[in-house]
Every structure is written in structure tokens, then in C-alpha cells.
């Protein structure tokens, strides 16, 4: 019997071991192949070893055609495209809309999300929503984008509040109580500082002569508006909201250059936030402070970042009349940009404190990137904190944190220095060029002229970004034509089919 024959038993065991070995090798090869396939590797028809990448393409509105290097893809937006690594020209098309395009280089095994394509109609339709009593002097939109508040030169204590969610869009007057204004007889100027996060209270300045007062205007009950300058006994001081809270304030003392926090119940804190004079500062939340101070080194200043009890040196800049600071939160990390008007660059950082924690021998953090912006006049961070952008009157430069990519953008015409470019969302912003409102992607692609608006006011958007809201100037009457009042106009960013 075979199982009693020692030689046959040995041969049987060898066959079993060989089988197990071959089986293990097969499993290993299969795992390796699956791993390569999962990471996008494959062999093309010519026998070359290639690694795929993945591209997501979405658009607003959706169901648009997608072309890669001129070849139409089977999927419409929202499209998931598995393609070999390489360079691609991506085109998104939909009937009635202007084409949206973007070039990209896709690395093998990488994922690129082009989920921000916003298509603009070929023919823009603008309608007049309502007449305004006069040309607005200043305007600010609430955080939820429902409300737009306007100030006017004539009768400045009477503001206009516009409700963009009403159909049709409506407006009413809000009157700042004369009793809370120190010099109501003087014809002052009202300018907006910021809305609180309840979308009801807005901090404004009322300037009459050489006196500026900070007033918290209550949209729902104007009689409950408060003069914050008077209540905090801070004449001549700069006041802002803490974390958009309508009862917490930062107070910058102009005489000592020290920054305090305050509440209406307790007044100013006993100690300043930083016990050193500040040349410039930018706050975020209640305990993040990016600031500039004297350094002690001739011709240089220190830029520092305070987060809770940690206070770190970021960099030194050349002494200037004006410093540019931007600070925001991406995930749980601070992102920031620093510059000054004598620099031709913006220096960008992503979580500098974490860098120093991981590199204890370093005295200052290494910049994430340096954006070249000749003649820089401003910095801005997108609404979702994913992009930081520096700009001058003729150029922009941006950095996308997630992809860790930077872009240089040349602008035709001049960017208005009177209106800071405004982010529509995390990927698109609007800038003013001699009153013309232009929308552009953060990387400089797809630059569209949309509509005109009053110089110095810019434009705003409805919450769903389906309409752009702008302002037309009043036109005086002539011998042959009647006067035309200033108007709020709306321009649809959707075709009639998609509304």
C-alpha cells in the first residue's frame, strides 16, 4: 500500500510542499498584480508599463460634456475619469454656456478634483430689481448672503437693507437712532466693518468731522442698536468683533498701539493681549493673532503668530508704511500670508507651529511657498481657506493648499484698488476692472466679464450663486430725458432652461 512505502510518502510530501509553494507564489503574484492595478499600473498595447491617475470633473450646472485633449468622454459631469499619467487639456461644454477649460499635468497614481467648473451663460440677462434713493456709498453682504446693507451720502443715519431671498427682491429703510450718535447734527459717513454670525447685527463706523464712532446696528430692531465706542469708553480706538460675536470685541488703542479684548458687560480686559505695541495685526477666532512689531534690528520688523499661550516668530520683513496680513483656518491648522507694499511677493505658511514642533532645531518655520506679485497691494484667502491669493493692479498669484500648487496670473486691464477681490466660494473670485465685474478661477483660468457695477461697491451674489447683484448709477435729467435713479440689478448665471 502506497502510504506504507517510505519513498512514496516522501514523494507525496514533496508534491504537497511544491503545491503549497506554487500556491503561495500565485497568491503573492495575484496580490502584487492587484496592488499595481489598484494604484493605476497597467501594460499598454505596445508593452510599456504605465500608471493611471484619476480625475473627477464636476460642473455647475451639471450634465455638461467633458473633453480630454479634444476627445469627448462618455461620462457627463459629474464624471470620473481613469486616464494614464500625462498632460491634458480639459474642456467642459454645455449648450447655452461658455466653454470652461483647464490644463493639468496628471501624475501616475494621483487624484485630481476639478469639481469647481462654473459655467457662465453665453448671453447674460440683466433685470432691474428696485430703485434706490441715491447712489450707495458703501455696501456689505451678510454671512448667509441673504441681506445686503447699503449706506448713502444723503441722510447717512438711514440705511437700506435688501432681502435677496424675497421674490421680487425687496428693500426697506433702517434708521440708526439719533440718540446714540454723539454728533447727530453733523452730516457723517457710514461705512461697514463686518456682520456678526447671527446675520442680524452689523458693526459700522459713523464718521463726522474728525470723530469716528463704532455702532452695532440691529437689523431687526434698529432701536436696539448700540454705540460701542461710547459703551466701551474708547473714543478714537479701532474696534472689531471677536469670532463675529455681537458681544465680544477687539479694541486697538490708537495712543498706545496695544490690543485688548472687551465685552459690553465687563468693558476692556485689564491686560492687553500682547504687551508690546503692534504695527499691524490680523485676528482669527478668539485666540489666534498674526501681528507685526518692532524688531530692534534696523530696517526690519518681526512678524509673529500667537495661538493661545504659544507665540512664535514667523519672519522678518523690511520696515514699511503698510503691512499685509491674512489669517484663516484650514481643517484645524492655521494658514496665513504676509507681505508689505514694498515687497514684490507674498510669503505663505501652512501650520507654522506644527513645523516648529516637528523641527525643534529650527528658529523660524519654512514657508510653504513664496508668491511673486510685483507691486502687491493686497492679500485674500478663499471662503473655504483652500486658496491664498496676492494681487496687484495688473497681476495675481495664488497657492492651492490641497494640491500644493502655485499659479501666476496676468490680468488684462487694472484691478481696482478700491475694492478687494471677493470670493464667491472656495475656487472663484470676482474683481472689479473700471466698474466691470470679472469672475476668474483661482488658478487664472476662465476669466469672464459679467456685468457693470458702481465703482467702489463691486457686486454680490444670491446664496445659491444663481444671480450676481450689482448697482447702476443715477443719471441726472436732461432737457430731453428724465432722470434715472440708482438701481439694484440682477444678472442670472443660469440659462432659462436651468433656472
Image (tube, grey):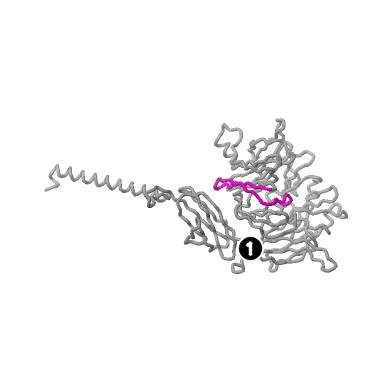
Q: Is residue 296 above or below residue 399?
A: above
Determine which residue is flagged by label 1: 493
Q: Position of residue 370 (x, y in %)?
A: 61, 41
Q: Residue furthest right?
A: 185
Residue at x 64% of width, y 57% of height: 448
- The C terminus lies in which quarter of the figure? bottom right
Please name whichever residue, 21 or 103, is drawn nearer the observer in this view of the structure. Answer: 103
Residue 488 falls inside the magenta stretch:
no
Please name whichever residue, 134 or 119, is drawn nearer the observer in this view of the structure. Answer: 119
Q: Is residue 250 above or below residue 116?
A: above
Residue 408 falls inside the magenta stretch:
yes
> Taking the image as drawn, is residue 140 in sight?
no
> Taking the image as drawn, is residue 105 in sight?
yes
* Element on which disc 1 rests: loop
Could you tell whether 22 is left or right of 489 in the image? left
Could you tell whether 46 is left or right of 434 in the image? left
Q: Position of residue 389 (x, y in %)?
A: 64, 47
Q: Residue furthest top?
A: 297
Looking at the rendering, the stretch of residues picked out in magenta corresponds to 394-419
Could you tell whether 100 is left or right of 126 in the image? left
Count residues near mark 1 (Cα–Cα under 10 Å), then give few for <14, some for 14-19, many for 20+. many
Q: Position of residue 78 (x, y in %)?
A: 52, 60
Amino acid at each position: 500500500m502506497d502510504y506504507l512505502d517510505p519513498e512514496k510518502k516522501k514523494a507525496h510530501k514533496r508534491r504537497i510542499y511544491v503545491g503549497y509553494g506554487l500556491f503561495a507564489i500565485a497568491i503573492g503574484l495575484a496580490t502584487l498584480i492587484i496592488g499595481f492595478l489598484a494604484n493605476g499600473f497597467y501594460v499598454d498595447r505596445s508593452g510599456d508599463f504605465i500608471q493611471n491617475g484619476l480625475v473627477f470633473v464636476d460642473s455647475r450646472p451639471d450634465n455638461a460634456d467633458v473633453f480630454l485633449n479634444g476627445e469627448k468622454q462618455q461620462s457627463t459631469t459629474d464624471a470620473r475619469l481613469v486616464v494614464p499619467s500625462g498632460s491634458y487639456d480639459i474642456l467642459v461644454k454645455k449648450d447655452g454656456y461658455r466653454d470652461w477649460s483647464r490644463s493639468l499635468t496628471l501624475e501616475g497614481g494621483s487624484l485630481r478634483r476639478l469639481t469647481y467648473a462654473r459655467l457662465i451663460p453665453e448671453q447674460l440677462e440683466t433685470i432691474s430689481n428696485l430703485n434706490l434713493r441715491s447712489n450707495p456709498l458703501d455696501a456689505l453682504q451678510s454671512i448667509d448672503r441673504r441681506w445686503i446693507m447699503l449706506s448713502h451720502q444723503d441722510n447717512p443715519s438711514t440705511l437700506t437693507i435688501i432681502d435677496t431671498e424675497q421674490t421680487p427682491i425687496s428693500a426697506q429703510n433702517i434708521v440708526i437712532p439719533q440718540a446714540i450718535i454723539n454728533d447727530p447734527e453733523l452730516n457723517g459717513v457710514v461705512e461697514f466693518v463686518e456682520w456678526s454670525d447671527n446675520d442680524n447685527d452689523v458693526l459700522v463706523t459713523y464718521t463726522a468731522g474728525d470723530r469716528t464712532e463704532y455702532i452695532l446696528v440691529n437689523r431687526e430692531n434698529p432701536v436696539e442698536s448700540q454705540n460701542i465706542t461710547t459703551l466701551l469708553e474708547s473714543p478714537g480706538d479701532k474696534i472689531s468683533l471677536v469670532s463675529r460675536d455681537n458681544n465680544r470685541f477687539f479694541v486697538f488703542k490708537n495712543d498706545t498701539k496695544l490690543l485688548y479684548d472687551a465685552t459690553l458687560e465687563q468693558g476692556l480686559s485689564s491686560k492687553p493681549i500682547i504687551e508690546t505695541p503692534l504695527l499691524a495685526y490680523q485676528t482669527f477666532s478668539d485666540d489666534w493673532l498674526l501681528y507685526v512689531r518692532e524688531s530692534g534690528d534696523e530696517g526690519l520688523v518681526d512678524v509673529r503668530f500667537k495661538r493661545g499661550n504659544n507665540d512664535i516668530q514667523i519672519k522678518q520683513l523690511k520696515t514699511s508704511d503698510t503691512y499685509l496680513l491674512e489669517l484663516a483656518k484650514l481643517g484645524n491648522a492655521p494658514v496665513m500670508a504676509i507681505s508689505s507694499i514694498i515687497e514684490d511677493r507674498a510669503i505663505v505658511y501652512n501650520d507654522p507651529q506644527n513645523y516648529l514642533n516637528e523641527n525643534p532645531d529650527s528658529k523660524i518655520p519654512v514657508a510653504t511657498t513664496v508668491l511673486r506679485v510685483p507691486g502687491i497691494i493686497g492679500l485674500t484667502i478663499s471662503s473655504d481657506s483652500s486658496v491664498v491669493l496676492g494681487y496687484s493692479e495688473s497681476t495675481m498669484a495664488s497657492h492651492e493648499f490641497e494640491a500644493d500648487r502655485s499659479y501666476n496670473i496676468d490680468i488684462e486691464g487694472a484691478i481696482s484698488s478700491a475694492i478687494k477681490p471677493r470670493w464667491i466660494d472656495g475656487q472663484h473670485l470676482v474683481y472689479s476692472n473700471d466698474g466691470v465685474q470679472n469672475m476668474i478661477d483661482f488658478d487664472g483660468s476662465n476669466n469672464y466679464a459679467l456685468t457693470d457695477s458702481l465703482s467702489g461697491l463691486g457686486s454680490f451674489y444670491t446664496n445659491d450663486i444663481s444671480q450676481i447683484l450689482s448697482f447702476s448709477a443715477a443719471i441726472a435729467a436732461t432737457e430731453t430725458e428724465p432722470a434715472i435713479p440708482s438701481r439694484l440689478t440682477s444678472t442670472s448665471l443660469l440659462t432659462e432652461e436651468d433656472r
